[in-house]
């Protein structure tokens, strides 16, 4: 893992990012890269790039994308106007899990959030992901809220 780097995603990374989502049956939301789906992913990527509140990152070993995550900056009135950063879509290539990549990505996310003035880093994780929950707790995250989602 010595050659691991983390950087903002580029358009050329898009297929590799979606392939990471494909590997995750639980969290993929039916994601699959194909000529039919490519335009929708390209539009979403362009929207993320234009947004001042969103950043999409990749973890790269050599020339291979092995991880990804998105940060969303959320101005907030609570906490005296504290800025929060939400970590979303954390994925590590299945064959590279338990190699420290996720920990490096989360440390990068924390440093990036802190550098940009955030007071809190938050994330959600599917209730069935017991291993992920232990991982996040080892990194200092605490279980603090019950989350709800509604598909529209």
Image (spheres, rainbow, N blue to C red):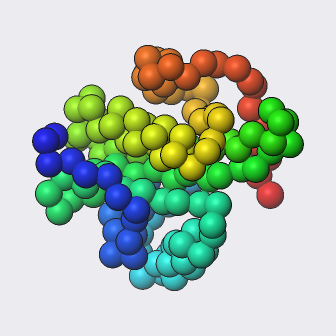
Image position of 120 (left or right of 94): right
Q: Is residue 14 left or right of residue 4?
A: right
Find the residue positioned furthest to the right: 77
Residue 49's place in the image compared with 108, above or below, is: below
Kindly tell me whether residue 112 is visible in this rendering: yes
Quadrant of the snapshot with the N terminus = top left
Residue 66 point in image, percent of width and height: 28, 51
The image shows residue 81, relative to residue 13, as above or below, that is above
| Residue located 23% across and 40% down the image | 96
Quadrant of the snapshot with the C terminus: bottom right
- Front residue of 77 and 34: 77
Q: Quadrant of residue 138?
A: top left
Q: Position of residue 71 (x, y in %)?
A: 55, 51
Whole-percent x and y of residue 36?
48, 81
Q: Is residue 35 above or below residue 122?
A: below
Q: Nearer the viewer, residue 150 or 135?
A: 135
Task: Judge whether residue 25 can be spotted in this image.
Answer: no
Q: How many circles with numbers are drawn on the protein? A: 0
In this view, the residue in front, 118 or 128, is: 118
Spot occupied by residue 20 in the image (x, y as percentages of width and height)? 37, 54
Question: Which residue is more in the foreground, 54 or 81?
Answer: 81
Q: Residue at x 22, y 41 (%)?
A: 95
**Residue drawn where x is 86% and y is 42% of the image:** 77
Q: Residue at x 33, y 75 (%)?
A: 12
């Amino acid at each position: 893992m010595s050659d691991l780097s983390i950087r903002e995603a580029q358009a050329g990374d898009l297929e590799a990012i979606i392939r990471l989502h494909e590997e995750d049956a639980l969290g993929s939301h039916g994601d699959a890269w194909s000529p039919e789906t490519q335009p929708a992913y390209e539009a979403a990527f362009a929207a993320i790039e234009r947004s001042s509140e969103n950043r999409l990152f990749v973890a790269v070993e050599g020339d291979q994308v092995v991880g990804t995550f998105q940060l969303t900056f959320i101005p907030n009135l609570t906490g005296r106007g504290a800025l929060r950063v939400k970590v979303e879509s954390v994925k590590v290539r299945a064959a590279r899990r338990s190699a420290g990549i996720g920990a490096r990505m989360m440390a990068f996310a924390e440093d990036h959030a802190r550098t940009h003035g955030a007071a809190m880093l938050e994330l959600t994780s599917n209730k069935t992901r017991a291993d992920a929950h232990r991982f996040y707790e080892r990194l200092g995250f605490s279980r603090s809220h019950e989350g709800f989602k509604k598909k529209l």
